[in-house]
Amino acid sequence: MRTSQFFFTTLKEAPADAEVVSQKLMLRAGYIKRSAAGIYTWMPLGLRVLRKVENIVREEMNAAGALELLMPAVQPFELWEESGRGPAYGPELLRFKDRHQRDFVIGPTHEEVITDVVRRDVKSYRQLPIHLYQIQTKFRDEIRPRFGVMRGREFLMKDGYSFHTSFDDLVREYGNMYATYSRIFTRLGLKFRAVAADTGAIGGDGSHEFHVLADSGEDDIAFCPDSDYAANVELAEAVAPATPRAAAGKALEKIATPGKMACADVATFLAIEPKQIVKSIAVVAEREDGDKQFALLLLRADHELNEIKAAKIPTLGAFRFASDSEVQEYLGCVPGYIGPVGVDAGKVTVFADRTVAAMSDFVCGANEAGFHLSGVNFGRDLPEPAVFDIRNVVAGDPSPDGKGVLGICRGIEVGHIFQLRSKYAKALNCAFLDENGKSQIMEMGCYGIGVSRIVGAAIEQGNDDKGIILPPTIAPFAVCIVPMGYHKSEAVKAAADQLYADLKKLGIDVVLDDRNERPGVMFADMELIGIPHRVVIGERGLKDGQFEYKGRTEAEATMVAQGEIVGLLQGKLCGA
Amino acid sequence: MRTSQFFFTTLKEAPADAEVVSQKLMLRAGYIKRSAAGIYTWMPLGLRVLRKVENIVREEMNAAGALELLMPAVQPFELWEESGRGPAYGPELLRFKDRHQRDFVIGPTHEEVITDVVRRDVKSYRQLPIHLYQIQTKFRDEIRPRFGVMRGREFLMKDGYSFHTSFDDLVREYGNMYATYSRIFTRLGLKFRAVAADTGAIGGDGSHEFHVLADSGEDDIAFCPDSDYAANVELAEAVAPATPRAAAGKALEKIATPGKMACADVATFLAIEPKQIVKSIAVVAEREDGDKQFALLLLRADHELNEIKAAKIPTLGAFRFASDSEVQEYLGCVPGYIGPVGVDAGKVTVFADRTVAAMSDFVCGANEAGFHLSGVNFGRDLPEPAVFDIRNVVAGDPSPDGKGVLGICRGIEVGHIFQLRSKYAKALNCAFLDENGKSQIMEMGCYGIGVSRIVGAAIEQGNDDKGIILPPTIAPFAVCIVPMGYHKSEAVKAAADQLYADLKKLGIDVVLDDRNERPGVMFADMELIGIPHRVVIGERGLKDGQFEYKGRTEAEATMVAQGEIVGLLQGKLCGA
């Protein structure tokens, strides 16, 4: 492509309402143009990137044995009534009546339609498994569209659905998709993590999210830099400390801590670290028969309670925080000074976090206003507690897979794989006849990738003050040729045209900037739009038989002999 | 692809409500599956065809210098108010309010959106011309969706829009698109015609429709088999007869024709051909000042009046048919016996069709109930008339380009190119600064192709009692290998697998039918779904080192030496 034949529309400034860097840069680079809130036109430059992402997704899905089809964007609402999702979906679901007053929706997702297709066409176990996917424009009427293409209302999505005779076979395909998604994001050249979206390792009754790592992400992810472990912070397991509890070394002592109710204040007052303090969180679980269970959840003062985990304690279950009067009633003390020592075991249950269970000589509330206890030890001063993982992980925690130490980063969700099991198949009676001629409901998986969101996420991950940085696999062009004086120097023009023709012949996606612009303008544009490799051709270099090469992220350009430039680029693109 | 890994869902019978052959065959072959009226899922097999069509369109559009972009399907209604089209469009336009009660439409076409994009980005003549196109799913709420994908509500369309500094440049691009569309339909392997959709040759202020020729088409097209002339029947020029009017040979005679008012009855009664009779059609043009012009339009009895052409007679203009009382008032006669002889030239104007003007010794009404005149001759019995082309062409008429004789066929419109001029650019103030810094409104063209409709039209053109016949360029697979006993004979399996691998390596789109089905089932399926080339591999043939080859439209199979089959297929696909 020659820039003179392209439609470049770069902007010096991003519109004032652009919020995140990818949105600003995509608008400035002329990738997209806003049509309405959350609705964009993909301009030719941006569409090149979108299509490259789309093609990588398609190639890998096909290689994995999935079959592409194309379902209608407009779906009969009846199917949504049949699945029971219609009323539940809320105003994000765009409903309308056609001219004959029949109800339709613009599909935000296609579980109903694909299940309807499969139940009509698949009768026998011999036709299974089947994995069908599409790459399609979808519409979700987000209440607050934002972040450009990352949270738009109209967006391009790959959604796949697999159907199976057994859970085992679903698990097999789930693993296949886990591997396929990993290949896709690797080929896209992105730093990413597959994040357990619930308790599950692969094979559990579970789901995984695929996140592109970027500071602007909306999700906190705990990950291990030395392995592929990653999980949402809320779901990552906080493993027990490797070193066992030290023996008691101090005597139990009651200390006056007047007015020091917050752990941080106690730590400062006593000149100790928060790591030596145990905080007690009073909660109440109300039983159906009206009984109340009052419990103390013990956490190290610098840790945070994870309510999802705590609610999974079998002997506790769903709980709420205790009121001040309940604290007074069960512990005879105002909040701020409560603790596990000396409580009535018949009335108060104590659950300790794994980290707390490994502590000795710690400080906690004395159950007496204005006092704390120090030198507290389990087994000596109070009974051994029931121990559970009830906190959020923090950076520095051991990785649950035993392969290193966790870090915390932010991620942008760009993919999600999910074991649906029989949720939709049951509601829509999607059944098959098994080997014995018996009708069975199918097992189902679904697998999504936000194709247009990937473009935004890739730019969130790759950018600098000059503009967009993209891997050559998805950059709008892999190489740009910037001639100095294309319209003035015959030699420059000839060399530029020749290199352009040579690279094109090799199938390299090259753009020749043949506009009659100042070098500064051309350099700035090529950097802004994110071209990974730049070759500058000028009269001075030509005299020595040299071109100037610069990688998008390199600080300095280097001179390269004319005869070596093609090989250099091939090497860089091949290695990419 | 192996059929065992594909999702084949052929049907013995088409659903009862399928109307046309392409719809029946696409449903039977498992190309599509109905979701709602006019709304279909493209199953994997059909999607292969759709994508091949789409890719040919894309490649040729890119080669022609157009740039692909992707506009949103959901458009703000404001733009439709600005262009003035919103209220006019009617219920085919799907409107809805988003959750914030803002008005949107699901775009049936994108003139407004593209004009909005261009007016915001293009400021100078230096940025023009520009041609932007997209390939996108569109929705039109047809009142009576029918014919499967040929008149569906949701469909895939290529729509392109070009912008120019001058009409001359628009005409240049219009010619470029005329040639590009011709290349596209040629590559698609379809019999087609570019049809002048109004008076226009290319370069006029005009438009052309591209029709795939098929008996089931909804439009009548006049075409010349010996040239590329084609036009809608209503618009095709009926040229004057090549042979001049013969000299008068008979005397004027008044003949009693009691009760014979229709031309056919007169012909039978007089034992002459309708070609010897001139019918007179009485019309009235009412002027703004209240004046009435009464006129007789003379046509040969076997020809049909073309009202569009007649209304273009400068001295007539818009007209209506005369009432019986007006006929009585101006001609003193009841309808059925009226004619041009002896009328009052001050009150009645006579316009003759070109064919009539070349007639002599003809029969016409005598302006007296129960009587006709025979042996009538212009110049002798009545004045020479004003002569115009006012009839529809018929098969056998000379082609207006002088290159042969017209035929009439039916066509399915699959493309349309149009010189929009400044209609939208003016309404949306899409302007540029010219060389002199003066603001000018752009000239605009638009160019559409019904991508999904092409699939239906191609099947309307190509089918037989066995199923679909498609050219290899767009067939779901170009070649099928049908082994006899793949699961029983090692030799057959080995030969089939080897040929499959060889063809794949050559980039030939081949399907291997490795299902454990009877040969008859496999043959029928491969014929039904439209595979152009079939290779059968059986033990008997293998013993002689031979495969069986059969083209989809060939009556008989031929035996081919194993070593020659690849070359044979290459030759057939290369020539395609």
Image: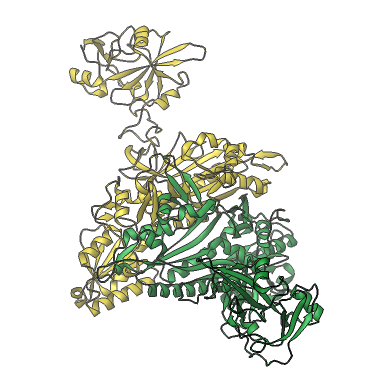
Chain colours: A yellow, B green
Residue B548 place in picture, x, y as percent: 70, 72
Q: In what quadrant of the picture does the N terminus of chain B appear?
A: bottom right
Task: Judge whether A39 appears above or below B345 on screen.
Answer: above
| Residue A78 lies in quadrant | top right
- Residue drawn at x 80%, y 78% as measured from the top left: B268
| Residue B365 lies in quadrant | bottom right
Q: In what quadrant of the picture does the C terminus of chain B appear?
A: bottom right
Residue B319 place in picture, x, y as percent: 58, 68
Drawn side of residue B120 relative to residue B296, left or right = left
Drawn side of residue A51 relative to residue B92, left or right = left
| Residue B327 lies in quadrant | bottom right
Q: Nearer the viewer, residue A432 or B25?
A: B25
Task: Judge whether A325 appears above or below B463 on screen.
Answer: above
- Residue drawn at x 43%, y 8% as measured from the top left: A346
Drawn side of residue A292 relative to residue A132, left or right = left
Residue B358 place in picture, x, y as percent: 64, 86
Q: Is residue A49 visible?
A: yes
Q: Nearer the viewer, residue B470 or B243?
A: B243
Total marks drawn?
Answer: 0
Q: Nearer the viewer, residue B123 or B43?
A: B123
Q: Is residue B563 visible?
A: no
Residue B130 place in picture, x, y as percent: 37, 67
- Residue drawn at x 20%, y 64% as measured from the top left: A520
